[in-house]
Amino acid sequence: MIFSELIADLQDALKKDLAQIRFLLKKNPAMGYTKIVDIGKEVGKKYNIKLVVNFPKEGRIEEFEMYGKRDLSLIVDYERKRFPIDREQIKQKALEFLGDVQTEDAYMYENKEGVRVFGKNWKIDILPHSVHIWTEFDEKVTAFCDWLMENAYQMKKK
């Protein structure tokens, strides 16, 4: 449940400062983006995670109602190169939680490993040290990410 808690905290924090963020984005977009990034960092610290709010496509930064609801990177431990569980288990759980998706091994070089899960217009990159979620967090994605945090990253609820 740590992912669910983290995104709820992030959404609350972003909503609380939304007026200031909107003002900064109009006045100086770089300062507005910096404010969003700083809020993500502060929320992540509570969970011992480096949390990065991403805006991978032009115009998404103006979609205020979606802040904290898609496109996040969670860096858990830069030093980790291997998962504590088998990659096949991650792929199987992705299919169980997400349904009609494809999975593949990814980033398999220099004794590293990773898994990519993808649907038609989205993907989740799962590395031993981080997870990058490039989609909206619906119930299925959230449940899968909760499972990942507990099993692939061995992080328990606070």
Image (tube, rainbow, N blue to C red):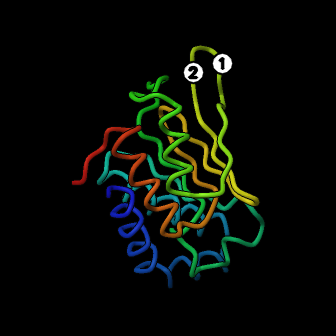
Marks 2/1 in contact by CB < 8 Å: the verdict is yes
| Nearer-the-camera pick, 123 or 64 | 123
CA gap, disc 2 to disc 1? 5 Å
Question: How busy is the neighbourhood of tag 2: few (under 14 within 10 Å), some, or many (20 plus)?
Answer: some
> Helix or strand or loop: what does disc 1 sit on?
loop
Instruction: Check disc 2 and give the amino acid type.
Output: Lys
Residue at x 33% of width, y 45% of height: 150
Q: Residue furthest left?
A: 158
Q: Position of residue 135 (x, y in %)?
A: 63, 61
Residue 77 sits in which quadrant?
top left
Q: Position of residue 93 (x, y in %)?
A: 49, 46
Residue at x 55% of width, y 56% of height: 72
Marking on residue 109: 1
Give the residue pinned by disc 2.
112
In this view, 130 is above or below 10 = above
| Nearer-the-camera pick, 95 or 57 | 95
> Helix or strand or loop: what does disc 2 sit on?
loop
Q: Position of residue 108 (x, y in %)?
A: 65, 23
Relative side of 92 to 9, left or right: right
Q: Position of residue 86 (x, y in %)?
A: 46, 28
Residue 43 sits in which quadrant?
bottom left
Relative side of 32 to 81, left or right: right
Residue at x 32% of width, y 58% of height: 1
In this view, 99 is above or below 152 = below
In this view, 102 is above or below 107 = below
